[in-house]
Image: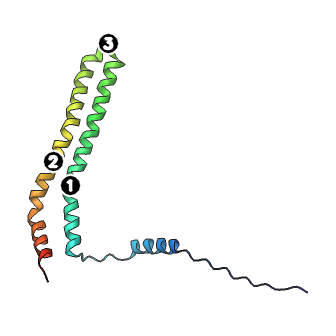
Amino acid sequence: MEEKREIFNYTYSAKEQEEIQSIRKKYLPQEPKEDKLGQLRSLDRSVAKKGTAVSVIIGIIGCLLLGVGMCCTMVWMEGWFIPGVIIGVIGIAAVAAAYPLYNHITKKAREKIAPQILKLTEELSKPE
């Protein structure tokens, strides 16, 4: 005589459920309204983005130019020593200019967006 066994397995994983919900949220329609504190945070974050991007690009280009200049002076010394020094100095200048360029761009962006930030901070500071 054969015995029938019915087995029921159930596994619940909180991590899986969280992952499922986070994936689901990506595909739900986004609510356009944002609270004032969220607007203030996003405006504050957006100020440094352009300056950071430009300064990183200039810094990378400067590093590459410095490397090319070093390569010219050390590997191809015969005809490329003087041009290599010039290229390397240009690269050093670009790397040195990256941070002041970041400060300048960020300062201009802060001046441009200051009225919106001040308005939002005044609205958030008022007691209700």
Side of 27 relative to 57 (left or right): right
Alpha carbon distance from label 3 to label 1: 45 Å
User: Looking at the picture, does residue 15 appear above or below residue 83?
Assistant: below
Q: Secondary structure at mark 1?
A: helix
Point out the tag, 2 or 3, that comes first from the N-terminus. Answer: 3
The x and y percentages for residue 25 are 40, 74
Tally of marks: 3
Task: Decide which of tag 3 and tag 1 comes sooner along the chain.
Answer: 1
- For marks 1 and 2, the one nearer the N-term is 1
Secondary structure of the residue carrying tag 2 is: helix
Dot 3 lies on which element? helix
Disc 2: which residue: 103
Residue corresponding to mark 3: 78
Q: Nearer the viewer, residue 11 or 75?
A: 11
State left or right for residue 15 relative to residue 126. Answer: right
Q: Residue furthest front?
A: 127
CA distance for labels 1 and 2:
9 Å
Distance Cα–Cα, label 2 vs label 3: 41 Å
Q: Position of residue 40 (x, y in %)?
A: 19, 68
Which callout, 3 or 1, points to the residue nearer the camera? Answer: 1
Kind of residue at disc 3: Glu
Q: Amino acid at mark 1?
A: Ala
- Indicate the position of residue 24 as horizontal and vertical percent values: 44, 74
Asked if the residues shown at circle 1 and circle 2 are in contact, with their CB atoms under 8 angstroms apart, the answer is no
Task: Kindly identify the residue that appears in the image at 21 percent across and 29 percent down.
Answer: 90
Tell me whether circle 3 and circle 1 mark residues in contact (CB < 8 Å). Answer: no
Q: In the shown orientation, is residue 19 left or right of residue 111?
A: right
Look at discs 2 and 3 and give the one toward the viewer: 2
User: Which residue in the protein does label 1 denote?
Assistant: 48
The crowd level at tag 3 (other Cα within 10 Å; few <14, some 14-19, many 20+) is few
- Which amino acid, by three-letter code, is at mark 2? Asn
